[in-house]
Image (cartoon, rainbow, N blue to C red):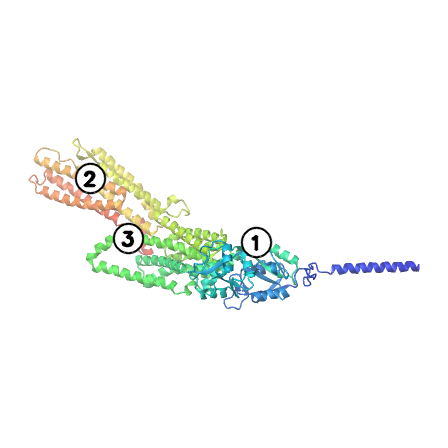
Amino acid sequence: MGQGTAGKTRCRAGLAWLLGVWLALLCVPAGAETDVLGATDTGAALTGAPSDTLRSGWFVRPPYQFRGDPSGLGPPTGLDIRVAEEALVALGHHVEFSPMGWNDQLQALRTGQIDFVVGTYHDPERLDYVRYSRPYREERNALYVRADSDWLRDMPLRKDFVEAVRRGDFHLGVTAGYAYASPEIADLVADPGSDARLRTADDDEGNLRALMDGRIDGFVADPVIVDLMLAETGQAGRVRAHALDLGTVGVRVMFARATVSPEFVERFDARLRAMEDSRRIANLEVEHILPAFLAMATSETWFKTLTLLGILAFSASGVILARRERYNLFGALVLASLPAIGGGVLRDLLLGREPIFIFETPEFLLMPVAVVLAGFALYKFHDHFLVYRQGARHLILRQQAGWGGRVVGNLQRGLDAWAVASFTVIGVGVAVESQASPLWLWGPVMAVVTASFGVIMRDVVRSDFNIDMLKRDSFAEISVLGGILYSLILLWPPVELSLTFILVATNAVIVLLFVLRLLILYSGRVNPLQMGDPHSLPERRLDRLEARERERWGELSGYLGEDAEGHASPVPLTGLEARHKDFEYALQPLLAELDLLAGEPLFEAAVARHQGLRERLRILVRLEQQLYDYLREAGATAGEGEAARVASSLETRVLEGLRSLLDTVAFAVASGEREELEWLREMTANQRNRFDALRARYLQHEAMHPGGPLDRVLQRTHRVERMMWLLADYVEHRLEPPRAVAGNDRRRRQQQRLRDG
């Protein structure tokens, strides 16, 4: 019994000892491991992190690390900081960043004073005190030299460059504690040899100063950081990146072995993969790196020139409208400023951008003022010559109708095309800088707001009931398509994002939109995306009516035939009656269509075309009636005697001239060429002079007797004289079409008159 009791006691003691060992094993942290010296990590908790708050250091390295608030008081931000922060917050941890130099961060990692460092390369020499995450982005190294340097001109290979540095032929600047992408460069820095000349600096800015002072021949750095630094310091023209390929390297996060377990790093890596799959890291690159490159691009002189040219284009169009609609000087300034800067101001207000772009530099507001003042002075000078220099009046008007008008028209088209191209790119660039997300949506929206909404506001101020941009014009559609294209290029670059890529993409989009807009303007095509049937557009209906007008002119020459001797003579009376009725029947639908068009809201140019076509048709109707009346009475001089023979000869000559003139008119009207119409005007004037001389000669003929055959022929020729004057009037209407009516109230009244006939 006692032995049994003792045995039970020993058994219970053994079980208790085993249970204690088992519990002790359970208390060992899951992340503990033995390093090469046999020590264990003691700080990692079961969650894989020492506490809910993880600490890190940071230093100014834009766009990867920088102070987001311009006042310098806000928390740090940047691509590397945002990636690490979002991943750690998703894992349930808070993050604290403290200003700290690079070497101080490495020392703090070693001692466990901080838990991680962002934006690092893999370096095997640090594995005894850090754990590396997986790469979350790629970074390239570039060699920077002075722009006037001819070093390495014949060294396209990396190994040749390394050998030149080892021999002491090239003085290289290096950054303390910086790990390089190229293994050859890393080996060179670690073991330079006795002849190599290396100069160590604390950061890239120190290397840049040494390069400009001539203390080094070049240095290796991240091109994103250095390009930004060069743009901000204005030294982009003095330093250049060499074409030497120094490779790329993955950028990682370093965690302190003293505080972070490998399991936590694995969880962090999994979170990075999720951010990559969801394109979150790519979006963060767009938010931080892309604005930096665009800021560099927009700081260039060529881009500011592009912006000012776009403002110039819109300002000039406003001045032309102010002249046409008789605005005063302040009204002209409003019409010029709204399309030039109104869209940009509205865009900045929508994005909450500060300051609004017109407050950044006075040129953006002074440009419309200068254009208005210059336009006002030129118009006054022009009017002075027209009023007080009668000798120059005809020359000025002729040049305006000829090459001068064509030059101004081509210039206006070019400025219009430049405006849509430049403002589209500017709108997308501002959306990127303002971090409007998603860019594929807000980029095109800001492009069309910048390019189009100022014009819409101008037309609203003008009380225009036909806003061209919202109806037949394709200006806004080109801006939307260009904004989509440019945004997609920036979001999914086919190569590594760089300043060169941004400049090439920007210029390519500008040229593409410029050429596309010019082609549309010169082709005269209306917007195919209008609501309703495109064949019912007033412009196309006017085209068809003008074509039918030309057909009617071609029918008039058929009123004359030939006699047995080949001379011009009227067609038989029955045929003449049939042609006259057919002409009237064919003209009625044309006039009815004009009446229908008069009841629709027409654009300025369409109103002018409608007015001109109606006036020309009235001339055509009167001329056809005069021709019909004359030919119906022609040939009534048949008889014998000298007087009848002379009268018949005169009438034959008149009919021959009339047939020649009608054939010429039909040819000139069918061609529509200005040169042909000018030739017709000259020919009509000559025919009138010859006709007057012919009549004067026959009035003095001895066969001329009141009431005789010759007198009756001469009386009928008054109808021919009226036809010649009608032809001259028609030619003037074709060469000098009516201008668009100034002012929308007057245009409305004119359309009312068109409807009233």
Q: Amino acid at mark 2?
A: Ser
Q: Position of residue 616 (x, y in %)?
A: 26, 46
Mark in front: 2 vs 1: 1
Q: Residue at x 80, y 59 (%)?
A: 19
**452 left or right of 608?**
right
Q: Which residue is mark 1?
A: 276
Q: Which residue is mark 2?
A: 660
Q: In the picture, residue 561 is in which quadrant?
A: top left
Q: Position of residue 658 (x, y in %)?
A: 19, 40
Q: Position of residue 448 (x, y in %)?
A: 43, 55
Q: If you read the primary sequence from the N terminus, does the residue marked by circle 2 or circle 1 appear first?
A: 1
**683 left or right of 494?**
left
Q: CA distance from mark 2 to mark 3?
A: 32 Å
Give the vertical position of 311 relative to 593 (above or below).
below
Q: If you read the primary sequence from the N terminus, does the residue marked by circle 2 or circle 3 appear first?
A: 3
Q: CA distance from mark 3 to mark 1?
A: 58 Å
Secondary structure under tag 2 reads helix
Secondary structure under tag 1 reads helix
Q: Amino acid at mark 3?
A: Gly
**633 left or right of 363?**
left
Q: Which residue is mark 3?
A: 405
Q: Is residue 56 visible?
A: no
Please state which of residues 569 and 382 is positioned toward the viewer in this rendering.
382
* Crowding near the residue tagged with mark 2, few <14, some 14–19, many ≥20 C-alpha atoms within 10 Å: few
Whether residues under marks 3 and 1 lie with C-beta atoms below 8 angstroms apart, the answer is no
Q: Amino acid at mark 1?
A: Glu
Whether residues under marks 2 and 1 lie with C-beta atoms below 8 angstroms apart, the answer is no
Q: Position of residue 97 (x, y in %)?
A: 58, 65
**87 left or right of 594?**
right
Q: What residue occupies the far left of the structure in this picture?
A: 702
Q: Residue at x 31, y 43 (%)?
A: 545
